Amino acid sequence: MTSTRARVVANVVLVSAGVAAAYVVLTTPPLRRLVFRAAQIWLGASVPVYLVNQTRQAWLESGRAA
């Protein structure tokens, strides 16, 4: 088996596993609630932290002399 062929097979296996996991999560209400809650917590924490870091970096760079 060539390296390219192995890579294609591995990608197909990973995609099919991802689709199967997504199907199980979306069709099982407790898992669906868990995933949506985790996404809310992740977005609620990571987006504001990213924005604060970007603002801080812009503030520091704006004070530098050319």
Image (cartoon, rainbow, N blue to C red):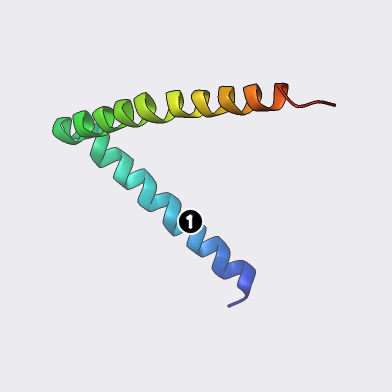
Residue type beneath disc 1: Val
The answer to which image quadrant residue 38 occupies is top left
Marker count (numbered) = 1
Residue denoted by label 1: 12
Does 5 sit above or below residue 64?
below
- Local crowd size for mark 1, using a 10 Å CA cut-off: few (<14), some (14–19), many (≥20): few
- Judge by depth and name the residue closer to the eye, 42 or 48: 48
| Residue in the image at 30% along x and 28% along y | 41
48 sits to left or right of 22: right
Can you name the residue that lies furthest to the right here? 66
| Residue in the image at 27% along x and 28% along y | 36
The answer to which image quadrant residue 44 occupies is top left
- Judge by depth and name the residue closer to the eye, 55 or 28: 55
SS at badge 1: helix
**Residue 33 image offset from top left, x and y in percent:** 20, 28
10 sits to left or right of 29: right
| Residue in the image at 32% along x and 46% along y | 20
Does 52 sit above or below residue 22?
above
59 sits to left or right of 40: right
Does 23 sit above or below residue 16?
above
**Residue 56 image offset from top left, x and y in percent:** 57, 25
Split into 4 quadrants, where in the image is the C terminus?
top right
Split into 4 quadrants, where in the image is the N terminus?
bottom right
12 sits to left or right of 39: right
**Residue 49 image offset from top left, x and y in percent:** 45, 28
| Residue in the image at 61% along x and 29% along y | 57
- Judge by depth and name the residue closer to the eye, 29 or 41: 41
Does 40 sit above or below residue 23?
above
Can you name the residue that lies furthest to the left here? 30
